[in-house]
Image: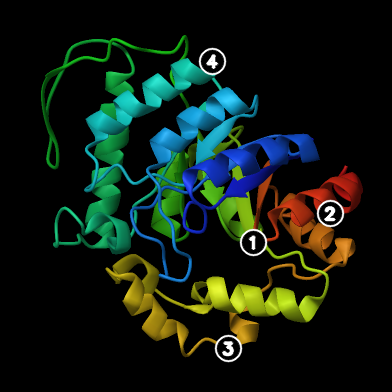
Amino acid sequence: MTTFGYFLSCEEHGPKELVRQAKAAERAGFEALWISDHFHPWLDEQGQSPFVWSVIGAIAEATSLPITTAVTCPLVRTHPVVIAQATATTAALTGGRFRLGVGTGEALNEHVVDSRWPPLAERLEMLEEAVGLMREMFTGKLVTHRGRHYRVDTARLYTLPEEPAPILMSGFGEKSIELAGRIADGYISTGPSAESVQRFHQAGGAGKPALGGLKACYAADEASARKTVHRLWPTQGIKGEASQLLPLPRHFEQLAQMVTEDEAVNGSPVGPDPEVHAQAIRQYVEAGFDEVYVNQIGEEQDAFFDFYGREVLPRLR
């Protein structure tokens, strides 16, 4: 049975609004939550970027839903030992309802503490070491580590959950997906690719969950929904490695000027037809994803939750 969840966007909304949306998602019938972890938004127009761990703490008390970061980068901006402590505390606070989603990150968020942005091969190496280090911290033992990328001196976590939080990994390219299959407890993607899910399973992820996420925009008419997507998420139409390499929102704004409305929408379900939204989600189910998370672009959050609760989620179930 597929789980359907809501994807909270820290790039668009402040902390109190995110907590409110989490409660609304639970009332609407969503069964789980994703939340993005950013230092900067992609564009100034999006306008927000709260510290995700504070927001998760508030959501943990406001809802009973499981929460997954989609995704945290434990490489540069925040040391993996600190992420391990945040994860363990959050898992203890939620009674086991938390999973740490990790990835190799973007210069947009990570360059704020180090202007050198490592190439992907090095970041994958760093991520593998970071995940191993965090798992060692989750044992509650005293950890001293002298690795290629990280140094840890006699560190121990005292606040721990009953069971360590699962670590899921985002991956798009072949090498990233194969690493996820080898080291992660689950796979995260934002595209309905059956090939990616199969590669994850073949690389060691058999029996582990695959989680997919997409953006949608409900509105009373399709034209206004398309405009909202083009205004807030033209970055969906930016191809290639730019999203990993550019350091500032203004750089994405410059590229976004070349993105058409059609390129921005880029397969996202938009408008008031529930079957359009249901069919976009079914693509993920058919591709083999065990959990699918939907984000509503724009300000019409309450209308979205009403629409999905009445029209879309019942179709999917």
Q: Which residue is mark 1?
A: 299
Relative height, residue 108 to residue 15 (above, below): below
Q: CA distance from mark 2 to mark 3?
A: 27 Å
Is residue 99 at least partly visible in the picture? no
Q: Which residue is mark 2?
A: 307
Which numbered disc, 2 or 3, marks the residue closer to the eye? 2
Q: Which residue is mark 4?
A: 95
Spatial CA span between label 4 and label 1: 32 Å
User: Residue at image x 48%, y 51%?
Assistant: 10
Residue occupying image coordinates x 78% and y 56%: 303
Nearer-N-terminus badge (4/2): 4
43 on left or right of 312 = left
Instruction: Mark 4 and mark 2 in contact? Answer it, CB < 8 Å.
Output: no
Q: Classify residue 49 as left or right of residue 224.
A: left
Q: Earlier in the sequence, mark 1 or mark 2?
A: 1
Residue 288 at x, y percent in the picture? 70, 48
Q: Amino acid at mark 4?
A: Gly
The answer to whether 262 appears left or right of 19 in the picture is right
Can you identify the residue that label 3 sits on? 260
Secondary structure of the residue carrying numbered label 1: loop
Quarter of the image holding residue 216? bottom right
